[in-house]
Image (spheres, rainbow, N blue to C red):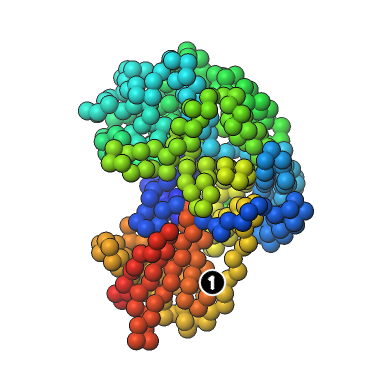
Amino acid sequence: MKNYKSRFHAVTFNKPIIKIFFRKSIAFIFFFCLLRFNSHSQILPEAALEKSVDSLIATQLKPNEPGISVLIAEKNNILYKKAFGSANVELNVAMQPGMIFRIGSITKQFTAIGILQLVEQGKISLQDSIQKYIKDFPSKGYTITIENLLTHTSGIPDYSNGDTTHNPYIERHDFTPPQIIKYFDYLPLEFKPGTKYNYSNSGYVLLAYIIEKVTGEDYHQYMMKNVISLAGLQHTLFADEHTIIPNRVEGYTRDRGFFENCEYQTASMAFGCGDLMSTTEDLYKWNNALLDYKLVSKETLSKAFTSYKLSDGSYTNYGYGWFVDSFGVKRIHHEGQVSGFTAFEEYYPDKDVYVSILTNQLSGEDTTDFSDKRFRLFNNIFQLALGNKLETEAIISEAILDEYIGTYQAVIKKSETLKIYKEQGKLYMDLSNKTGRHMVLQPLSQNLFLLPDVMRIRSTAEFIRENGKVAKAIFTQEKPYEWIKIK
């Protein structure tokens, strides 16, 4: 079993068929959504922004380590575009801003646009069932629509969570789309379509295959001609292990406390859901092409950027290929993780600010705090891009920290507990439902802590004493939730 810490989306992987590491979005109790910042009226002046981001990155990145490429833009003006670290550690090749990375699940928004174009052309409908295009896909007793696939509400299990015990080298083989689909088409649905949200790579494999069925063309060729080229992207292409791609960076992992070459995995297993490569500037151009309605109409794009409404009236925070949420200002975004690479792209429409971050390292299993620090680095870059001040960490004695250690029970849902524990002088938290683990508590004062790993809405923990002893913790995420210390 492979457990990954809660960042943008809390997640637990169970021996994936392929280690695609696409960060899932599972709403865990009371901890749902990305760190909200105290918004200022505008972002930093360009020179100040450059100095702040440079200084921030310099504290964590060494020239001979896997690197990072960052672009920050506001109102059609690129304010910051730089790269740091190494594109190839063994050959000592310095990272450059125009280099090409795998972008993992950011691919999904491209596939979504390909589908939405066909909807606008009248060739498919969002309410069409899968079986209209993939005749032999079992219905499982329900109508599973194109819209269900786009919004991760189909109930179809994620094939990347499959069991590899029968073939531990499966990710080294090349697969056709029908062969990938056979890995999950027989599995029972996890829920009735439209009633719940559960991030599933399987849905986007099906969408890519439906594009082939409807157009009669190879998915990759169709997308290059009708989506990628139409957007004016010159450095965005589908991953291929055999083709020479100039400026392609090497991917690395740091799962055992030191950097290693990433494990080989066939790009064919990420068909339609994670097989694109790009640059920070091309991703920015992609966002601009969308906003200029070069690919789909304003009405269609608005639907893609709108959180899907479930049958019970609740919202999922996911549209058609994009996460959609708010932390003071609206945010439209996606993250991608694939062997050796981590990618982020975020657009804040109210401020007209865009940020893309690409890295050639993935460290989800690192037992040190390296991975924590890297994700906080990414988070801090977003803060600076929005003109927000970085919060400073308070110094607290270990004796006081020890008082907070223990198990706490939720007042609202008593079956839920959380564990507070200490490692190397810092407090960490695990949730009993396993959707968030080893989440660091960063002290802001003697009794108030920030949870920087919960990145969608600003989340804090305040410890309350009664009669001189710690009796409860108030976790605040837009509104407070009370947890009683039971031991």
Residue drawn at 50 percent across, 81 percent down: 398
Residue 454 image offset from top left, x and y in percent = 47, 57
Instruction: From the image, tell me which residue sits under label 1.
Output: 444
Q: Quadrant of the C terminus?
A: bottom left
Query: In the depicted view, which residue is nearer to us: 419 or 246?
Result: 419
Residue drawn at 72 percent across, 47 percent down: 80
Residue drawn at 34 percent across, 68 percent down: 482
Residue 9 seen in this snapshot = yes
Residue 366 seen in this snapshot = no
Residue 283 image offset from top left, x and y in percent = 62, 36
Q: Secondary structure at mark 1?
A: loop
Q: Is residue 311 above or below residue 118?
A: below
Q: Amino acid at mark 1?
A: Leu
Query: In the depicted view, which residue is nearer to us: 18 or 338?
Result: 338
Residue 239 image offset from top left, x and y in percent = 58, 31
Query: In the depicted view, which residue is nearer to us: 27 or 83?
Result: 27
Q: Is residue 465 above or below residue 351?
A: below
Query: In the depicted view, which residue is nearer to us: 382 or 478?
Result: 478
